[in-house]
Image (cartoon, helix red, strand yellow):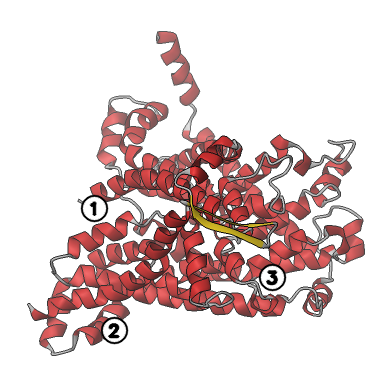
Amino acid sequence: MRHNRWGYYFLIPFFLVFIIFQLIPLGTTIYNSFFEHYFRNGLTEVGPNFVGLANYRTLFSSGDIGQYFKNTMIMWVMGFVPQIIVSLLLAAWFSDPSLRLRGRKFFQSVIYMPNLIMASAFAMLFFALFADTGPINTMLLQIGIFRAPYKFLSHTFSARALVAGMNFLMWFGNTTILLLAGMLGIDQTLYEAAEVDGANATQIFFRITLPILRPILLYVVITSLIGGLQLFDVPQILTNGQGGPNRTTMTLIMYLNKHLYSKNYGMGGALSVILFIITGILSIIIFRINTRSQQ
Amino acid sequence: MTAKNEERKTGYSLGVGARRVIAYIVLILLTILCLFWFYLLFVNATRSKAQLNQGFTLIPSHYAFRNLYNLFHNSNLPILRGLLNSFFVAISAAALSSYFSAMTAYAIHAYDFKLKNAAFTFILAIMMIPTQVTALGFLSLLRRIGLMNSFIPLIIPSIASPAVFFYMKQYMESNLPRDLIESARIDGAGEFRTFNQIALPLMKPAIAVQAIFSFVASWNNYFVPALVLKKDSMKTLPILIATLRSADFLKFDMAQVYMFIFMAILPVIVVYLFMGRSIVAGLTAGAVKG
């Protein structure tokens, strides 16, 4: 059929834009990672000199990347564990016909809302609220929980907990809605049969719901992990780009951002490539899940 | 083993009534946890600088317009400019991403051609590539072609939005029958016109949801815009918030800081109040089906 060539025409804008703004930049990024190219003291240009894998060696031997990877993962886990537990619980409640919860739409709308809030504004808000003389400290002093203001951003645990807590708030609604969609898609007769056999709510949850949800759970874990690796806006604004205290909240993308600002193309390139490879591997898993659900 | 089973049984033989009460308590606590910060933001944005120094309260004051006036007349913080820039970029990006994603999805949905499956697989495969990992090359490209300090690199790339495409494709499968496209063809409409005048109107609900998501994503975007926009007059709101953060905190009038944050999230909240339901309903349509 002659009109079928229009399929190609309609694909042109997407692929043209993708090639120019993503594919070529990806190529340049990889290319740059093999060159020594930076600005000494921000002024004198050094390079570009071909150095092979030297940037990668420097990156790993300095140990910074390990530390930042660890920070990123710790904050992701601190947010993700409560996120998945709460989301599973809420989705199970929402989808349980015997509970007949009212206001499901309302609660869903409320818990999803933080996901749409500008992360940088949210972080700035938390910075103001949790400041040493901010409202949270004054409130805790007024109630009498604290005797002296607690410096939330000067302690590793509380600084990380703030980042993780905000991540939790921003994402648990989204995860709940995804899991709920999965649970509502489960064949009701399975539950009825289980009830007839005398299974209780826990048994049904662990023996029927969870196994059927496995692909969605895997999807949620991996997409959240990919998102976690990109953790940037919240810790960047909260700690003013310093990753304080003592760089314990510095994430991988904050590190990349530093290299981009100081125009260290070589090191920035190497770091980008490593992040690309990690997300690439994780994406393949997601891709498998998506294509399987297509069939 | 039996003891364990016994324990489980007693733990969960809680009546439906009791479980319902627990569910409501947890839901109400989570609702408070989600809304508390924004309520506090609202309260503090209505208080004067002096009142803010007096400590914590949950009762709004009446300085909102005073604070707004001060903020708009603060020459150090070009918030009006920032609002305009953010609106311009976000609306343009939303329009392009929803229109062209529908077009891309239509190409895969309505036609049969040799590379169809390859193209579809490819777009799915690149869905998860984060913009951050190509940012370095992206910036050097912009320097080469003179597009630093321009809104173009923040708008045009949204034409290629794999996630929006995926959603549109899913939506077309259940809402845009190919017979309909065929009959439009018999009527002699051109392919481009069929897309614009037959397919697009049927895609309205999907386009509305995705336009909102794209608007929000662009409105909130910080990483790339902060690297591209260096001129003060071009900065979008998230970049101004970063400036606010790096400026000496106490020198600022905190009332203005709260009002600034409030203004930055207000448009999204307003859209959400009107469209929340269809947004939440639209969320799952494009997600994996288990």
Secondary element type, mark 1: helix
Q: Which of A5 and B84 is in front in this view?
A: A5
Query: Does dot 2 land on a helix, a strand or a loop?
Result: helix
Q: Quadrant of the N terminus of chain B?
A: top left
Tell me whether circle 3 and circle 2 mark residues in contact (CB < 8 Å): no
Q: Where is residue A61 in the image (x, y as percent from the top left)?
A: 56, 35
Mark 2 surroundings within 10 Å by alpha-carbon count, few (fewer than 14), some (14 through 19), many (20 or more): some
- Relative vertical location of residue A269 with respect to residue B254 in this rendering, above or below: above
Residue identifier under label 3: B263
Q: Which of A143 and B226 is in front in this view?
A: B226
Type of amino acid at the residue the image marks with label 2: Asn
Residue with the mark numbered 1: A294
Q: Residue at x 42, y 28 (%)?
A: A202
Marks 3/2: CA distance? 36 Å
Give the alpha-carbon distance from disc 3 to disc 1, as whole Å: 41 Å
Regarding residue B175, the answer to whether it shows in the image is yes
Q: Disc 3 is attached to a residue of which chain?
A: B
Is residue B290 something one can see in this rendering?
A: no
The residue that label 2 is drawn on is: B196
